[in-house]
Amino acid sequence: MKNLEAQPCLIARSLALVGDAWSTLILRDAHYGFTRFDQFRKSLGIAPTMLTKRLAALTEDGLLETRRYSERPPRDEYVLTQAGRDYLPILMAIQAWGQAHCETSAVTRFLDEETGVDIEPVTIDKHTGAPIGSRPIRIVRQGEDDIVQS
């Protein structure tokens, strides 16, 4: 997806970083607290070569960073950077969309640590406070006419 990096659309450029399912699931697991290669591999059932590629890409793109936890043999763990931590609301929005549109038996849940209550994320416009999708929008590329209205 690297060919998307030069697009003027930030959705395209963001997807260049985390646009495949494996990368998103690795970030999900990192938010669960996983840091070690074997933890990710066991959780995802992903081929080691694929996992190595995805971890390297997420590290190169600044969503994860490596931290050495063993010198002999040399072993690194993968920890979320600020950019990786900032992805949590996106994961939660995907979860909420899945809750509404996918089979929902035996699903992972996000709970508020203090109350134990399921977190039900909503995306709102910072300026109006209106839920995204509840008001008409216009998508405009810089320097171009309107593209889409809804």
Image (cartoon, helix red, strand yellow):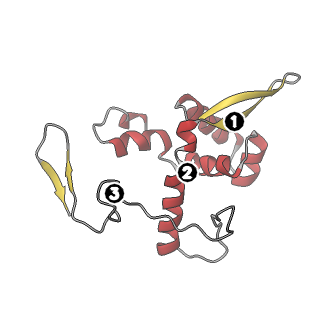
Q: Which residue is mark 1?
A: 78
Q: CA distance from mark 2 to mark 1?
A: 16 Å
| Type of amino acid under label 1 | Tyr
Type of the residue with mark 3: Asp
Give the alpha-carbon distance from disc 3 to disc 1, as whole Å: 33 Å
Which is more foreground, mark 2 or mark 1?
2
Residue with the most extreme left position: 145
Circle 3 SS class: loop
Provide the residue designation for mark 3: 125
User: What secondary structure is marked by label 1?
Assistant: strand
| The quadrant where residue 48 appears | top right
Percent across and percent down for residue 54 are: 60, 39
Mark 3 and mark 2: Cα distance apart in space: 18 Å
Q: Position of 86 compared to 16: left or right?
A: right
**Which badge, 2 or 1, comes first in the chain's sequence?**
1
Tell me the quarter of the picture where residue 123 sits. bottom left
- Which circle's residue, 3 or 1, is located before the other in the chain? 1
From what the image shows, is residue 68 above or below residue 83? above
The residue carrying pointer 1 sits among few (fewer than 14), some (14 to 19) or many (20 or more) residues within 10 Å by Cα, namely many
Locate residue 62, reporting x and y percent. 54, 31
Q: Is residue 41 left or right of residue 138?
A: right
Q: Who is closer to the viewer here, 74 or 91?
A: 91
**Residue 90 pos. (x, y %):** 49, 53
What amino acid is at disc 2? Leu
Q: Which residue is mark 2?
A: 88
Between label 3 and label 2, give the one nearer the viewer. Answer: 3
